[in-house]
Amino acid sequence: MKQTTLAKILAVACSLGVVTAMAQTSTTVTTKDAAAGTTTTETSTATSTGTISTYTPGTDYITFRTSTDAAPVRYYYSKDTTILDPEGHTVTWSAVRPDLPATVYYTRDGERMVVRKIVLSKPTVTEKETTTTTTTQKP
């Protein structure tokens, strides 16, 4: 009995570590050169792996969930955001739909996460079933 409880605690601790590793944050470095009077800001791109919760065409954001326990977070996109299928081919926004696993590459702009690239984890091709019915008349 005690062994199963310990195993459950270890499983939860390991899953929290994986979720934390998947939801990375971006790094911003600001350099000020007082002599030259310049300020340089560099922002690195971070990644987050999870599932698209909502996408509504015409809006400027998607909501994205890193795990089933986590609350969805807004990621803002622009016309420069690239959507890729699992093979790395560019696809249109029509391929994006809720409950689709993906990896989001983003940068932070203040409190907003701005998406640079979305890589979908499942193929975007849908299968279509065709049923043919033949009616034969007896003479």
Image (spheres, grey):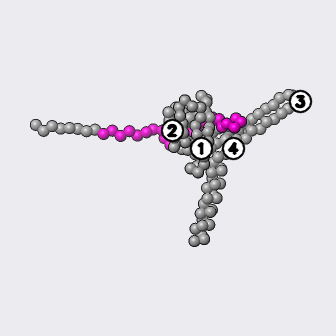
- In reply to whether residue 111 is colored magenta, the answer given is yes
Disc with the residue nearer the chain's start (2 vs 4): 4
Give the spatial CA distance, label 3 vs label 2: 51 Å
The amino acid at mark 4 is Thr
Residue found at the very far left of the displayed protein: 139
The amino acid at mark 3 is Ala
Q: Which of marks 4 and 1 is in front?
A: 1
Name the residue carrying label 2.
97
Name the residue carrying label 3.
35
Q: Are marks 3 and 4 in contact (CB under 8 Å)?
A: no
- In reply to whether residue 125 is colored magenta, the answer given is yes
For residue 132, what is the image quadrant?
top left
For residue 133, what is the image quadrant?
top left
Name the residue carrying label 1.
72
User: Residue shown at 62%/63% (left/top)?
Assistant: 9
Name the residue carrying label 4.
25
The circle on residue 103 is none
